[in-house]
Image (cartoon, helix red, strand yellow):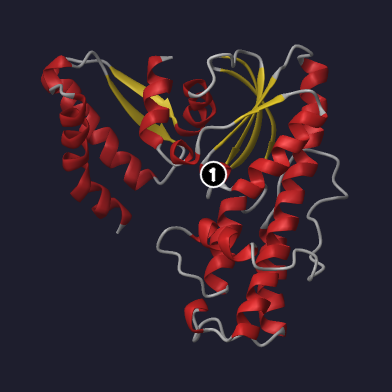
């Protein structure tokens, strides 16, 4: 289904981009296309379109790494960001901590060993019966504002592991068990139809989940900052990007980590955190 949706939309999307830029294919100097990571079937649609344009107009193709583009989009909002810098990439499919030493030169400090934070947000939002048409993460973030973040004693993942890797599978299980143990009928009763008591229970679960999910981020990022500063003492910026970086609670807590270590947090505005087009333009130009 995803491949079919991409195939149906890609011609219109490309044409709209050209129209808004007031150019045609013949005005292009190169064609940039995502080569990964991502769903291979969807990536193939983009690559096929790029090759078609490149062949007709005799243009070079620039392959763009999805997560590298996320890291470099920070330069759209802060021209002072220069190498080396520490980057945290957080999305539905990725948790990645990298020390960016130069363009194309990265040291991976940590990654997810199972589920990414965005996946945990999305799945928890579904289990809580939230309206996820605009995304599970934003829906859960909004509901969490109504809840008590200390009401449920979820465990912080991987505190016994002294590395920078992430794990959210266990926290997802804790959320599911919390819902089941409170006999919440979230499958049959969406949040819009919940009683006041039911809604408060769901809000408490959402707030408690968010507190622990982000505390796990803080733990790993603090260690990554310490490691990165030992390797590159001149680091001044902590770059955070990816869809989850649009979450205001996440931003606030990571800004605390940055300030505590004498770094400046740099994160695109929420609209650019999920706008892959801007990221790929930055990456292809670099």
Nearer the observer, 213 or 119? 213
At x 46%, y 58%, the residue is: 135
Residue 251 sits in which quadrant? top right
The residue most toward the right is: 160
Quadrant containing the N terminus is: bottom left
Q: Report crowding for label 1: few under 14, some 14 to 19, many 20 or more residues within 10 A (C-alpha).
A: many
Provide the secondary structure element on which disc 1 rests: helix
On the rendered structure, is 166 left or right of 21? right
On the rendered structure, is 239 left or right of 235? left
Q: Position of residue 224 (x, y in %)?
A: 77, 31
Nearer the observer, 22 or 187? 22
Q: Which residue is mark 1?
A: 246
Residue 104 sits in which quadrant? top right
On the rendered structure, is 249 left or right of 36? right
Residue 27 sits in which quadrant? top left
At x 41%, y 21%, the residue is: 282
Q: Position of residue 178 (x, y in %)?
A: 71, 76
At x 24%, y 29%, the residue is: 50
């Amino acid at each position: 289904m995803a491949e079919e949706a991409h195939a149906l939309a890609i011609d219109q999307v490309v044409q709209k981009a050209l129209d808004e830029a007031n150019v045609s294919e013949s005005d292009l100097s190169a064609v940039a296309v995502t080569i990964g990571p991502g769903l291979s079937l969807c990536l193939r649609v983009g690559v096929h379109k790029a090759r078609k344009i490149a062949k007709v107009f005799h243009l070079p193709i620039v392959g763009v790494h999805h997560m590298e583009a996320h890291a470099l989009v920070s330069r759209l909002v802060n021209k002072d960001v220069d190498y080396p810098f520490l980057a945290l990439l957080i999305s539905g499919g990725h948790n990645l901590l990298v020390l960016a030493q130069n363009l194309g030169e990265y040291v991976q400090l940590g990654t997810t060993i199972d589920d990414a934070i965005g996946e945990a947000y999305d799945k928890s939002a579904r289990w809580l019966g939230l309206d996820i048409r605009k995304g599970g993460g934003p829906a859960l973030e909004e509901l969490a504002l109504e809840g008590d973040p200390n009401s449920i004693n979820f465990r912080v993942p991987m505190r016994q592991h002294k590395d920078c890797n992430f794990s959210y599978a266990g926290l997802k299980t804790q959320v599911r068990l919390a819902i089941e143990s409170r006999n919440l009928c979230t499958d049959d009763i969406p949040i819009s139809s919940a009683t006041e008591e039911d809604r408060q229970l769901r809000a408490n679960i959402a707030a408690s989940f968010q507190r622990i999910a982000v505390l796990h981020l803080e733990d790993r990022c603090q260690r990554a900052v310490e490691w990165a500063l030992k390797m590159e003492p001149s680091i001044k910026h902590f770059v955070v990007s990816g869809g989850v970086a649009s979450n205001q609670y996440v931003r606030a807590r990571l800004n605390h980590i940055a300030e505590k270590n004498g770094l400046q947090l740099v994160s695109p505005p929420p609209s650019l955190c999920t706008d892959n087009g801007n990221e790929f333009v930055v990456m292809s130009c670099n």
